[in-house]
Amino acid sequence: MRNNHTGFTRKRRWGWLWILLIGIILGAAILAATATVLHKTSDTAFCVSCHTMQQPLAEYQGSVHFQNHLGIRAECADCHVPHQPVDYLLTKIMAVKDIYGEMVGTISTPEKFEAHKLEMAQSVWKTMKENDSATCRSCHSFDAMDITAQRPEARIQHPIAIKEGETCIDCHKGVAHILPDMSSSTKAGAAELASAAAVSPATATTLFTIATEPFFLTPDATHNSGNLLPSTQVKVVNQQGDKVQVSVEGWQQDGVPEVFYAAQGRRILSAIVGEDARKSLKTQSTSTDSETNLVWHQVSLQVWLPRKQLVDDQQKIWHYAEDMMNANCTGCHGLTALDRFNANQWIGVIKGMAPRTSLDQEQLRVLTQYVQKHASDMPKNPASNDAPAQL
């Protein structure tokens, strides 16, 4: 009996060992198969095997990440799949939605692809912003950069990015794919700004125009006497219904009475003044620029305009303009520091870059005001709502 029991125990023990061994072998096989599948489905050939990926492939093949003088190529997974194990697995799991999109034909035509391109791009940008551009940093590191050997623009921008704690995707959104049409995003920003203006407190005495706005000399006038440019600061004098009388101050160059500038000697447009309005101007002081010998007059004018076009916080205008700059100016060279140019130089820069953007004339005016009022020769006072802030 004892020998039989011992033999049974021995067989049982060997049975468990065989089960454990088979389990280990099966587990290793499953693990190896899973790793192989994950690896193969991260291969560029697999990524572009669907016909919907032909346009992204063509964009990628035209970028420096595909072909360059160093002969280094970044594959799809290098940019789109994180290297950290947990993030890697989560990304692969979330890729199931791409399979579903392929099955239902979400981007099955060039027209559908373009319609969804901005949404897809913003999703990628958001992820990269949240993970500090982890996939970019797997190849590019601030610590390993020889900044002195970089191009002039990069030599200026990278130290700023390091100091400000910026991440790669803040400036490099169009490095592997052509940027999507950003016009819908810009329109959404304009609508948000208009909504903010609509709820500005009635007690606010310092306001800012959110767009180019016609002004009138009387509250019931039907023909405007000029236009205020975006971001122009005004002081409330009187109110009548949905209209407000404001005082606007600025500088006029001697002999050029039809234009208000925001600062002496700087071509930052504040107002275009009609002939009737010029008769109502009040000159406060006159001075001569020692460098140019031009005579400048500090003037003020009281005008009427709709209150709904005025916002009490200038920073809301700047956030809108900053978003436009981020969306339209990063595809070619990254963001340019606002103090890279003085106020007058920025005029030429914006005009030169405008044809490469999707911005309309009004949006370009807002962007021009933004960069000019944050230029190298403009005062910077973050604590004040009246002066441009350092963003």
Image (spheres, rainbow, N blue to C red):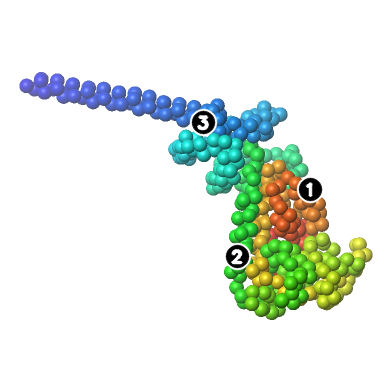
The quadrant the C terminus occupies is bottom right
Residue carrying label 3: 42
Q: Quadrant of residue 149?
A: top right
Query: Between marks 1 and 3, how big is the CA–CA gap?
Result: 41 Å
Residue at 61% over, 75% down: 202
Q: Closest to the observer: 271 or 156?
A: 271
Residue extending furthest toward the front:
222
Left/right placement of residue 346 relative to residue 31 reads: right
Of callouts 2 and 3, which one flags the residue occurring earlier in the amino acid sequence? Answer: 3
The quadrant the N terminus occupies is top left
Label 2 vs label 3, nearer the camera: 2
Residue at 63% over, 38% down: 177
Q: Quadrant of residue 209?
A: bottom right
Query: Residue 388 location, x and y as percent?
Result: 71, 63
Residue at 28% over, 26% down: 20
Callout 1: 10 Å neighbours few (<14), some, many (20+)? few
Residue at 18% over, 21% down: 11
Left/right placement of residue 49 relative to residue 176 reads: left
- SS at mark 3? loop
Residue carrying label 2: 196
Callout 3: 10 Å neighbours few (<14), some, many (20+)? some
Query: Residue 95 location, x and y as percent?
Result: 48, 37
* Identity, as a three-letter code, of the amino acid under mark 3: Ser
Q: Closest to the observer: 192 or 67?
A: 192
As displayed, is residue 74 above or below residue 3?
below
User: How many marks on residues?
Assistant: 3
Of callouts 1 and 3, which one flags the residue occurring earlier in the amino acid sequence? Answer: 3
Query: Residue 195 location, x and y as percent?
Result: 59, 64
* Identity, as a three-letter code, of the amino acid under mark 2: Ala
Is any part of residue 74 visible from this angle?
no
- SS at mark 2? helix
